[in-house]
Image (tube, rainbow, N blue to C red):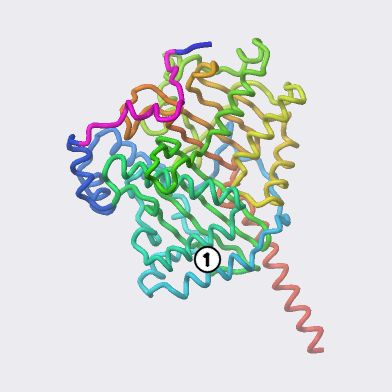
């Protein structure tokens, strides 16, 4: 099936859409660092639609956190404390090693309370709208390596490689548009949420910047990695002169999603296909916007109501359900093995409430959007039109993906009452034990 947004994804195809670097957008950007770039954007208000989106984001931030839901009501008791076999002491040691290298000013800037609303101020565009924490491209090489060591200890090896891939492609984009001070391999912020790293008490961190945002909550051996965002424009490095030549990300999420849609019967495809084109006239106002395009659960959308669309996964045959699990495995790739297994088992138990929906065509060369949505996870995939590149239609070389834990699960929020009770019980138990010993 063809569509008006058909765009191939062949290697190097994006190069026909390279921008004119002599226009003011790029000549100005090339002279600025990240802070100057953000200040001019925020204070200058250009472009108007993007500035309007920024103001809307700030308005959304004022809302108390509830979590993404399908109907506006948070469903309780979906999440429990569990053993994800996280190497928590190794992560704590790596974080304490970083802290020991920071100046008092850096430590003040990087440290937030565990319940700080600043968890929610991550964003994925290249402009630095929330300047908190420490920025990697402003650190010495040893300190920067210490930040990356925390990521490496926390993520799976393949998840860490994926994160590095996103960062390196961002650096490649910065070189393409000759603005490496705004877009580079290390143009990412790192923020700690405490009071301090601990193997027994809750804490976490946020790592965010252009096309890579990871929010990680840790408690004992358990991890909540949600929400996260990963994207790329273009999604591979094709320059032989780059030390990262051949780096490519998000192709498995693309391939598996298309394979699933193409495996469905015509009747099931019709049920899954919410809209036939990527910017469909049938879409209600607000269903598409300049920044998120078809995404519903991006930055600052912590409380969004996302009604079910598409077809139930429980109606799929065994092979199709296996494809769903393969897709979800890619979206859970950042998690170490035991945490990923726990999450997949939880998600699978909700297949009778899990919906698969699609926008766009599903021929081999079509651009598309898809979403898997259940009470315990939402993942989205979207081919985008150009932001730095000039393609006006969605293309397979510009991809956005994200994961949310609905019903209050993002940032470990749904677990926090359980953590509080667990902490309280542990302290009361310690006091009782001490009393018995003294007696």
The location of residue 127, given as percent across then percent down, is 32, 46
Q: Is residue 352 magenta?
A: no
Q: Please identify the residue farthest to the front as the structure is shown.
A: 240
Give the residue pinned by disc 1. Answer: 194
Q: Is residue 7 magenta?
A: yes
The vertical placement of 235 against 214, above or below, is above
Q: Residue at coordinates 59% horizontally, 58% vertically from top-left?
A: 154
Q: Please identify the residue farthest to the bottom as the structure is shown.
A: 438
Nearest the eye: 367 or 74: 367
The location of residue 365, given as percent across then percent down, is 49, 19
Segment tinted magenta in the rendering = 4-21
> Chief secondary structure of the magenta span?
loop
The location of residue 289, given as percent across then percent down, is 38, 28
- Asked if residue 104 lies left or right of residue 262, the reply is left
The vertical placement of 57 against 269, above or below, is below
Nearest the eye: 23 or 436: 23
Residue 167 visible in image: yes
Residue 62 visible in image: no
Nearest the eye: 96 or 202: 96
Q: Residue at coordinates 62% horizontally, 56% vertically from top-left?
A: 416
């Amino acid at each position: 099936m063809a569509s008006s947004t058909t765009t191939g994804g062949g290697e190097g195809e994006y190069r026909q859409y390279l921008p004119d670097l002599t226009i003011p957008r790029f000549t100005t950007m090339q002279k600025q660092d990240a802070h100057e770039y953000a200040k001019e954007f925020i204070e200058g208000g250009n472009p108007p639609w993007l500035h309007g989106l920024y103001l809307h984001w700030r308005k959304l931030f004022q809302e108390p956190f509830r979590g993404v839901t399908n109907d506006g009501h948070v469903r309780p008791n979906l999440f429990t404390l569990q053993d994800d076999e996280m190497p928590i002491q190794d992560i704590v040691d790596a974080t304490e090693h970083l802290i020991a290298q920071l100046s008092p000013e850096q430590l003040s800037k990087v440290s937030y309370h565990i319940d700080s609303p600043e968890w929610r101020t991550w964003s994925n565009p290249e402009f630095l709208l929330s300047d908190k924490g420490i920025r990697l491209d402003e650190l010495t090489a040893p300190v920067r390596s210490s930040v990356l060591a925390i990521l490496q200890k926390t993520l799976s090896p393949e998840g860490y490689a994926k994160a590095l891939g996103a960062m390196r492609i961002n650096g490649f984009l910065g070189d393409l548009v000759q603005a490496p001070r705004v877009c580079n391999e290390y143009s990412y912020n790192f923020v700690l949420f405490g009071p301090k790293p601990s193997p027994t008490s809750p804490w976490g961190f946020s790592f965010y910047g252009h096309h890579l945002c990871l929010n990680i909550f840790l408690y004992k051996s358990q991890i909540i990695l949600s929400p996260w965002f990963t994207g790329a424009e273009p999604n591979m490095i094709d320059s032989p002169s780059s030390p990262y030549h051949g780096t490519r990300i998000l192709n498995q999420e693309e391939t598996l999603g298309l394979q699933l849609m193409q495996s469905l019967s015509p009747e099931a495809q019709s049920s899954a296909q919410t809209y036939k084109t990527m910017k469909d006239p049938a879409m209600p106002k607000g269903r598409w916007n300049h920044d998120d395009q078809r995404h519903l659960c991006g930055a600052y959308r912590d409380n969004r109501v996302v009604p079910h669309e598409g077809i139930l996964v429980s109606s799929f045959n065994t092979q199709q359900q296996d494809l769903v699990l393969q897709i979800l495995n890619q979206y859970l790739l950042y998690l170490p093995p035991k945490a990923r297994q726990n999450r997949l088992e939880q998600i699978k138990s909700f297949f009778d409430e899990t919906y698969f929906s699609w926008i766009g065509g599903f021929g081999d060369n079509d651009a598309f959007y898809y979403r898997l949505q259940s009470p315990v996870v939402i993942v989205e995939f979207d081919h985008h039109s150009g932001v730095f590149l000039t393609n006006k239609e969605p293309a397979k070389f510009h991809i956005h993906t994200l994961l949310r834990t609905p019903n209050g699960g993002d940032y470990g929020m749904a677990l926090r009452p359980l953590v509080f009770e667990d902490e309280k019980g542990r302290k009361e138990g310690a006091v009782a034990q001490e009393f018995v010993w003294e007696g």
